[in-house]
Amino acid sequence: MSKSIRLFVSLATVFVLLVVTMGSVSAAPLAPKAKWTVMVYISGDNNLEPYVVPDIETELGAVGSSADVQVIALADRAPGYDTSRGDWQTTKLFRVTQGMIATPENAIADWGERNFGDPQTLIDFVTWTKTNYPADHYALYFWGHGWSWHPRWVMEDDTNADTLDYHETKAAIPQLGFIDVVGYDGCNMASIEMLKLWHGHATAFTSSQEWVGGEGVQYDLVLAQLAANPNMTADQVAIATSQSATADKTWSAVAVDSRLDALITAVDQWAAALSNGLAANRKKYDQAFTATRSFWQAPMDKDLYDMAYEINRLVPDQNIKNKSQAVMNAINAVVLHERHVNAYADVHGITIYHISKASEKDSNYLYYRSTIDFALQTGWDEFLNAYAR
């Protein structure tokens, strides 16, 4: 066989492979434009796998898709936890319909083994969904493990030993396009650092300050409201999501559009005032930070409102008091809904990273200062650096 013929055959083979691969990712027909398309990124290739099939069937499938509200889920499972519905483990793409059973036959497509810690998987999912199920508004839920901006936690994928870290999500966001509602159905995600990450790229953000149990977001309750009123605003969908998570200790819905500007500015100015008053008020700061509500197994996650309240209560400096009150006022203005159990009576829906000792300036701290937008664009990390000694 001549070189030219071999080259032709090779190119033809590559072309066929590309067509097959693209076909598997674009199997669904283009749907008429809906009012809302709800996307759920189900990272179940880990010990959360037993919840994957039930959440698809009993929550997403309790209401399912309609012409006004499309429900699209990309789901990955892991071996060794759950063998239901054929024990499928590759990544399945579902257009969820009412009463649907989560079997391979009911999937729109099989995407093979996809890494949910790879931002390209997220980009492919959102791009595919927006192309095939366009809508006036989009909601994107991250279903899986989480811990705010901390690396090696969010959307854990065991098969690929990977996570969707902050810097990867940050790089992916411009390619996702605008998302009206962003929800994290995972632990400890309601931080000002995550709010700042999505600032300007979404209207509202909803998640928990605390550990999230097996129930998390009750999608059936949210979708039922959307089905009854497809003209719900982004704020209303975020509030409905927060209200649905009744089994968890905390949940909140927060505006992350231009309304968040005032809070970012208030915290930046507060950090400057705290830095300027550090020498004179260090002991009072110690008392205030010790009194501030933190969260189970996450002592560095502190409630932002409660921290400002304690500083305002204990520090005599009037400028610091004023800046603390400004933070509290800004939180009240931006939090759309917040609920908590009695044990967390002092929380108000948003956490902030805090350390008190030089020994806590670990790799996470270095990642925070070098990578997290909130740290890069405010003086909060400079204050922590001076305070923690």
Image (cartoon, rainbow, N blue to C red):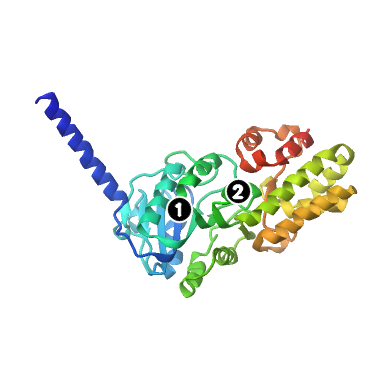
User: Where is residue 55 drawn, in percent x and y?
Assistant: 45, 61
Q: Which mark is residue 194?
A: 2
Q: Residue at x 48, y 49 (%)?
A: 47
**Nearest to the observer: residue 52 or residue 17:** 17
Residue 360: x and y, percent?
A: 71, 35
Q: Does 182 appear above or below 98?
A: above
**Residue 353 as seen in the image, left or right of residue 110:** right
- Res 62 quadrant in image: bottom left
Q: Tell me: 362 left or right of 308.
A: left
Q: Which amino acid, mark 2?
A: Met
Q: Which of the pair 342/129 is nearer the observer? A: 129
Residue 11: x and y in percent read 20, 34
Question: Which residue is found at the position 75% from the left and 32% from the top?
Answer: 358
Please, which residue is most extreme toward the bottom here? Answer: 228
Residue 41 marker: 1
Viewer-closest of 191 and 42: 191
Residue 388 in which image quadrant = top right
Please, what secondary structure does the residue beneath circle 2 have?
helix
Residue 94: % across, % down: 36, 58
Residue found 88% across the figure and 50% down from its top: 318
